[in-house]
Amino acid sequence: DQQVKQNSPSLSVQEGRISILNCDYTNSMFDYFLWYKKYPAEGPTFLISISSIKDKNEDGRFTVFLNKSAKHLSLHIVPSQPGDSAVYFCAASYFGEGAQKLVFGQGTRLTINP
Amino acid sequence: DTAVSQTPKYLVTQMGNDKSIKCEQNLGHDTMYWYKQDSKKFLKIMFSYNNKELIINETVPNRFSPKSPDKAHLNLHINSLELGDSAVYFCASSRRQGTGELFFGEGSRLTVL
């Protein structure tokens, strides 16, 4: 029962072009959506988030779009740089049972080619 | 000046043994978590503690026992290790209620032979 899905296990993009990572979710109770970035042998690090009441949030080269009717979000990286090569996890968050709960997708490995 | 640190980073052990992983955070957060990343790469929550109190226990076998001596520390003890326990275990911390921004440790890779 995967509430958050990233259907593309990998993505390869040329340096300077746009990278688009996609994520689908099934549960309407999530109040925040987040993207985390993970390098090998390191823990995930927070990248950008969006509230469920918004449809876009931008931070420098990173923009997250939320389409609530389609239960879909995407992360755009432009322009893509070699240092962006990492695994990107989509996550959905809600507050329940006294704690902030996060449900993660299975990740998409992004490779930026020079 | 690591925010969330966990030790050991690698752990190789035999089935049936007992092992512990330690975690410490210096961010002043109230809430700490243990996540497990399995062979399929999913990150799944196991436990969450808020100010030393267990608040989330996601149907984890009782061979796994978390302990929080204070709000800056959350340790994970695993009894009678099984092959299926092989995974990467991540500790994380956060404010109690927020957007879901978690700060993760580097992970502890456990291999059970």
Image (tube, rainbow, N blue to C red):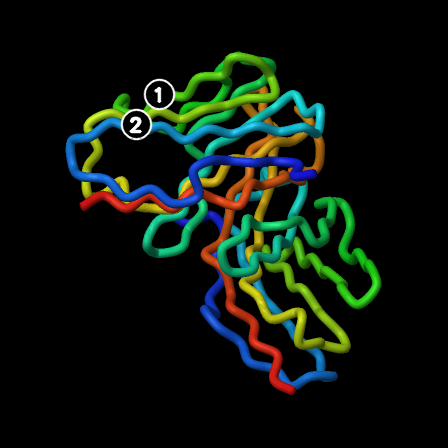
Residue on which the image places disc 2: B78
Q: Residues within 10 Å of mark 2 (few under 14, many from 20)?
A: some
Residue on which the image places disc 1: B65
Q: Is residue A1 above or below residue A11?
A: above
The residue that appears at 60% across and 36% down in the rendered structure is B4
Q: Amino acid at mark 2?
A: Ile
Q: Earlier in the sequence, mark 1 or mark 2?
A: 1
Which quadrant would residue A93 be assigned to in this image? top right
Does mark 2 fall on the same chain as mark 1?
yes
Residue B52 in sight here: yes
Q: Position of residue B102 (x, y in %)?
A: 63, 39
The residue that appears at 79% across and 68% down in the rendered structure is A61
Q: Position of residue A39 (x, y in %)?
A: 56, 60
The answer to whether the residues at label 1 and label 2 have Cβ atoms under 8 Å apart is: yes
Label disc, if present, on residue B42 of the rendered structure? none
Q: Amino acid at mark 1?
A: Ser
How far apart are the alpha carbons under marks 1 and 2?
Answer: 6 Å
Q: Position of residue B97 (x, y in %)?
A: 68, 26
Residue A64 appears left or right of A6: right
Q: Nearer the viewer, residue A54 or B99?
A: B99
The residue that appears at 40% across and 55% down in the rendered structure is B41
